[in-house]
Amino acid sequence: MINFPYEVMRERQDALERLELRVRWGQYDIHVLRFHLTQFPPGRVVGFHKHAEYEFHFIPQGKGKVILADQEYALRAGMFYLTGPEVMHYQEADAHEAMDELCLHVDIIDRTENGDEASGDSDRDDWEAAEARDCMEKLRTLPQFPTMDLHQAMPRFLEAYEACSDNFVGSYTTIKQAVVQILLRAVRAYDTANEQKLLPTRDMKAYRYRLAMEYIHANYDGLITLEDVADKLNLSSRHIQRLFKELHGGQTFSRILEDIRLGVVCRELKNSEQSIEKIAKVAGFAGGNYLHAVFRKKFGVTPSEYRRNARRQLSN
């Protein structure tokens, strides 16, 4: 059975929602209303409805469909979509397969529109405030169609849940940062999707390679094989392997997958306090011992040594 990294979130589905979670970001107040993992049983239908807030819908596993602005779209693992305030939408799980959904509902208030002054130059002019304004502006104009979670917003749900459950020093701040990261990574994913729409469609090699890489990035944390990628693209495994070797520096599927997973491990080692065992599972490795062997072979140091070295460099 494929390991589902978000399974733990079923234990206390309302854990994050019990928090009075408000995030101050630049000139904005972000009030978190819903923040959980839910499941649509096979064939479950949620008829047309709308919300007064922004709702981020991420699909970590399963499949189904959504109707946005009278247009129907298929949903599969690794995808997400955004419904803004007053956007009518319809959701349905596949008739034979359940669909899990990571949901984040946020009410976003611009304090300057309510007559509140931004608090000094630090709010108006610094990089963080500028990025907040840019992100919110893009949220208001995001297209109404699903795209792939190319920048790994989904793992931030698990990070927030574990921070809530473990209740370590700084857990509340970690959860708030996870909310901001989900917004930022969602916007970036749509930026990438829009750029891809401008690429020439006649170059089928590049197009198929891009789809294959999107699928790997969206599913690296599970049990994914070359045959899975080939099946999604309706091509043979041999054809996909040739594409990788031609367009990815001669590397095989296994090497590409391992490099993606190791990239995730490196980021988590630098930026989180999670144990090596947890990082291994988040990145799709079988366990900490296996990650230790692969990591040492690749980088010449153990994950723990890499973490210490990275933090020593930051402190210097």
Image (cartoon, rainbow, N blue to C red):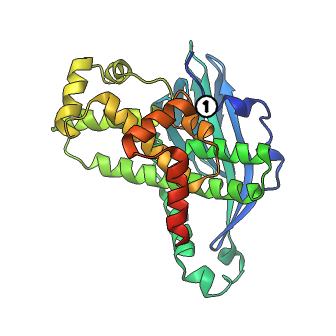
**Left or right, 198 with reference to 117:** left
- In percent of width and height, residue 159 lies at 65, 46
> What amino acid is at disc 1?
Pro
What residue is drawn where x is 59% and y is 33%?
90
Quarter the N terminus occupies:
top right
Work out which residue is located at the far top of the displayed protein and give it.
96
Asked which quadrant contains residue 260, the reply is top left
Where 297 sits versus 139, above or below?
above
10 Å crowding of disc 1: few (<14), some (14-19), many (20+)? some
Residue on which the image places disc 1: 5
- In percent of width and height, residue 269 lies at 54, 50
**Left or right, 72 with reference to 104:** left
Residue 284 in view in this figure: no
- In percent of width and height, residue 305 lies at 52, 50
Where 76 sits versus 158, above or below?
above
What residue is drawn where x is 35% and y is 24%?
229
155 or 95: which is nearer to us? 155
